[in-house]
Image (cartoon, rainbow, N blue to C red):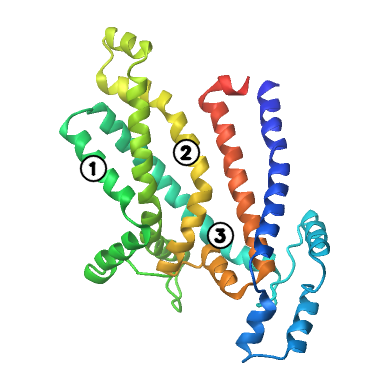
Amino acid sequence: MKPLLFVLGRAARVIPSILGIAVLNFVLIHMAPGDAADIIAAQSGGGTGEYVEELRRSFGLDKPLWQQFLIYLGKLLTFDLGMSNVQQRPVLSLIADRIPATVLLMLTAIVIATLLGILFGMIAAMRHRKWLDGVISILALLVYATPQFWLGLMLIVLFSVTLGVLPSGGMMTIGVEMAWPERLLDIARHLALPALTLGLFYVALYTRLMRASMLEVYTFDFITTARAKGVSEAKVGFVHAAANALLPVVTMAGIQVGHMLGGSILIETVFGWPGLGRLLFDALQQRDLNLLLGILFISSILVVAANLLVDLLYGVLDPRMAK
């Protein structure tokens, strides 16, 4: 019963969080100057004031801001994200076309970051103050300090231009018929560089965090007891210490989902990855307010859902949290 109440309690916090984020998104977007009518008029070679006003009326941008907000909020309650003012397609349809690519990129990057970060952090902590600890710490610091776009470009130069083993952009090879196993392999080859670029920054972060967490756990009494019982140092590190050092890494992984979603905008631009980041960048340039609000709303749901999942994992990793 208590685990169920724990899940329901965490889930109950999601709705007000999402509504608050939706309101904040609306206010911030409408504080920026210009709108889709200005962009469309400019793209058509200019236009009269009457033409621009007619565009604003057709988009509903001529209404007072409070009316626009009530209309926006009413549509959100029915999960109607409206129409893209520039592309003249339902916002939900545009997002649905792009979200699988972004989710695939983020999940792969998170898996790479957490697994490698935890592994390197454990090795560094188990070899504390030895040469391997120093090498891992220096490499983690260098990767952490390297701009992601530069790292992505260098990986393209190395693996695409010099070695020619991985494609430099896109999600799949266009214009070639493939069976599904070959298509999956093709997507995996295109995914490798952007996922590695996005994940390496967090590998460095989780490595340092896991190392510090394990070194703290090593000072606990149960570690001393395990060593006194003759438990091997490898088992002490990989079983006893690592299991108790995971909570900070899990916490950080949940917090970093939003940061990773923002970083995917740059990565998707560098690698031509057809995800939400590219769509958001285009919507910003075109001042497509409905599309911007829709992307931010869906992104907020993804971040809140990720944090809810982290809370539930807390209950699994540390049952005391569910009491």
Q: Amino acid at mark 2?
A: Met
Measuring 42% from the left and 73% from the top, which residue is drawn there?
173
Q: Which mark is residue 138?
A: 1
Q: Amino acid at mark 1?
A: Ile
Give the structural element (helix, strand or loop) at label 1.
helix
Q: CA distance from mark 3 to mark 2?
A: 24 Å
In the picture of the structure, the residue carrying the numbered disc 2 is: 252
Q: CA distance from mark 1 to mark 3?
A: 35 Å
Location of mark 3 (residue) = 100
Instruction: Verify CB contact (< 8 Å) between mark 3 and mark 2.
Output: no
Q: Going by the image, does 123 lie left or right of 46?
A: left
Q: Secondary structure at mark 3?
A: helix
Q: Quadrant of residue 246?
A: top left
Q: Visible in this render: residue 171?
A: no
Measured as percent of width and height from the top left, residue 205 is found at 37, 42
Q: CA distance from mark 1 to mark 2?
A: 21 Å
SS at badge 2: helix
Give residue 148's mark: none
From what the image shows, is residue 47 above or below residue 277? Answer: below
Question: Cβ–Cβ below 8 Å for labels 1 and 3?
Answer: no
Q: What is the quadrant of the N terminus in the image?
A: top right
Q: Is residue 150 above or below residue 1?
A: below
Q: Residue at x 51, y 54 (%)?
A: 261
